[in-house]
Image (cartoon, rainbow, N blue to C red):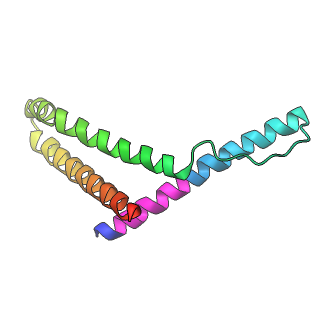
Amino acid sequence: TNATTTERVGLILEQYYQALTTSRKHVQDDSEEASNSKSKTPQSPLLPWDTFLMMYSECILNQFIILVCYDSLCRSMADASPTSQVYHDHFDRVNTRCARMLLTEFGMRRLRCK
């Protein structure tokens, strides 16, 4: 269902963000140990969670725009193939997934604003 997909995407995004910030922390710790720095001032994440979510939303929107702009071109190239229906079915599935992600993401953003 769409709700399940939304939950999974949220979980994957959180895990990805944690991996990014943990990776950065390990790099910082290693560089501090190498320089024998005595000052251990906590730093804020390089990429705040809200900024990460905003960038994700922009990526989803950009992907949708690209799909819309190039859909007819890709379909016309697929028509030249003997298995054109396979390609058309693939394009339909990709477009459907992207549209769902776009609607889900902007729906989530509206809920976050309340």
Where 13 falls versus 36 (above or below)?
below
The C terminus is located in which quarter? bottom left
Left-right relation of 25 to 37: left
Left-right relation of 51 to 23: left
Near-viewer residue (101 or 41)? 41
Residue 12 percent across, percent down from the top left = 48, 58
At horizontal 13% and vertical 43% (from top left) the residue drawn is: 88
Q: Residue furthest front?
A: 114
At horizontal 36% and vertical 57% (from top left) the residue drawn is: 109
Q: Magenta segment: does it hold 9? A: yes
Picture quarter containing residue 27?
Answer: top right
Near-viewer residue (105 or 34)? 105
The N terminus is located in which quarter? bottom left
Q: Magenta segment: does it hold 84? A: no
At horizontal 79% and vertical 43% (from top left) the residue drawn is: 29
Near-viewer residue (42 or 84)? 42
Left-right relation of 108 to 83: right
At horizontal 26% and vertical 50% (from top left) the residue drawn is: 98
Q: What range of the chain is rendered magenta?
A: 4-16
